[in-house]
Amino acid sequence: MVTRFTIARGAAAAFLLTGAALTSAAHAQEVELPNTLSVTTYDVGAASYNQGVALGTALGNAYDMSLRVLPATSDVARLLPVRQGRVEFGLVGSESFNAVEGTEAFSAPEIGPQPLRMLVGSNSDNCFTLGLRGDAGIETVDDLRGKRVGWVVGAPALQSNVAGFLAFGGMTWDDVEKVEVASFGGSWEAFINGQVDVVTSLTTGALPTQAAASPGGLKWLPLPASDKEGWARLQEIKPQFSPRLATLGPNISEENPLECAGFPFPVLLTYPDREADLVYNMTKAIDEQYDNYVEIEPGMIGWADERQDFLWVVPYHEGAIRFWEEKGLWSEEAQAHNDALIERQEILMAAWEELADVAEAEKTERWLERRREVLEEAGLPVYE
């Protein structure tokens, strides 16, 4: 399925380009974007898909261009078209960390570590945790034992999210009943239909909202920051997560916040060979159109420039760095961190190339062994 956005005309344009949109449109000539761009993301209805829709609408209205939003059901499927140059950007989640590390789905013989680069990340007032059916009798992480948990086939990043949250409570997948579902959207369908008790998700998006209104209802698993041992276990599996107090999502609010796990989601990224000018202009356009897409999708408040985390686990593209330097937000610390991440990528990529002639049947095992060796030799954390 492809969702395509083009500039509205006539009365529709007059309606859309009001208020803050008129202000942004006045500066549109400063941004130069192609007539058409594409971005891959999660299933229709997922939070990242909805944000891609809102971004496409805002950019289309302001710059007379079209953004195609392409849903894909697996981690690799969201990044492979970007690597091949058929799609310019990916709007993805924690699979970006697995991709740069060459772990999980990206340890496959035909894939390997990916030299990804970021443009922008969303640090919103939502978060990641486990969605719980309201009638499943789950209040804390200890209550997860024996419950039916959605296992999204072909999405190891989502599977490791669950593994991390189970580890918070000292459990593994062996302590719950694994229920295979075909996609992220399918996990929520099974949840609403009463086929699973637990799914992993961002707290915002159409699917959690639907679940909250369903007969079974929706609760969220709390991950208290005060549980230092639980967080240490979680971060051994998902180092990109950190404690966050969320106020955005069904059944949570500023009056009823949720302690949960946060990291930039979604992140907009590409590959280092993408033209620096294109990346610069895309980053600039995203910054200029902030008011417009947040009006469409409030969950995108995390895209604000003051919420950017330049010390995360994926390095930034040179074109994006140029823009963030112009904004006065890029620091020497950020540059040093970025350089270190790129050096880590180069170590991993070189190790992968060493195994180019290894038979496919042996390559994943040999790669994971070699990956550990080169990281330990460089004095770097392994993150397994």
Image (tube, rainbow, N blue to C red):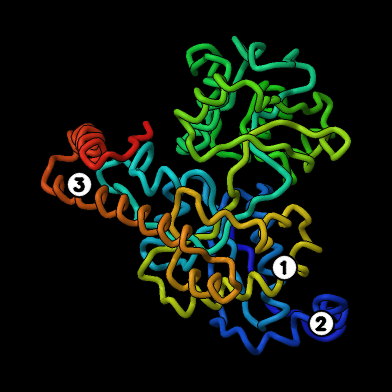
Q: Is residue 214 left or right of residue 75?
A: right
Q: What residue occupies the far front of the structure in this picture?
A: 332
Number of other residues with Cα within 10 Å of mark 1, as a class: few under 14, some 14 to 19, many 20 or more: many
**Circles 1, 3 touching at the beta carbon (< 8 Å):** no
Q: Residue 258 placed where, x, y %?
A: 75, 32
Which amino acid type is shown beneath numbered disc 1?
Answer: Tyr
Which amino acid type is shown beneath numbered disc 3?
Answer: Ala
191 lies above or below 336: above
Q: Is residue 40 left or right of residue 213?
A: left
Which amino acid type is shown beneath numbered disc 2?
Answer: Leu
Q: Which residue is disc 3 drawn over?
A: 351
- The CA span between labels 1 and 2 is 13 Å
Q: Residue 312 placed where, x, y %?
A: 50, 50
45 lies above or below 236: below
- The CA span between labels 2 and 3 is 51 Å
Number of other residues with Cα within 10 Å of mark 2, as a class: few under 14, some 14 to 19, many 20 or more: some
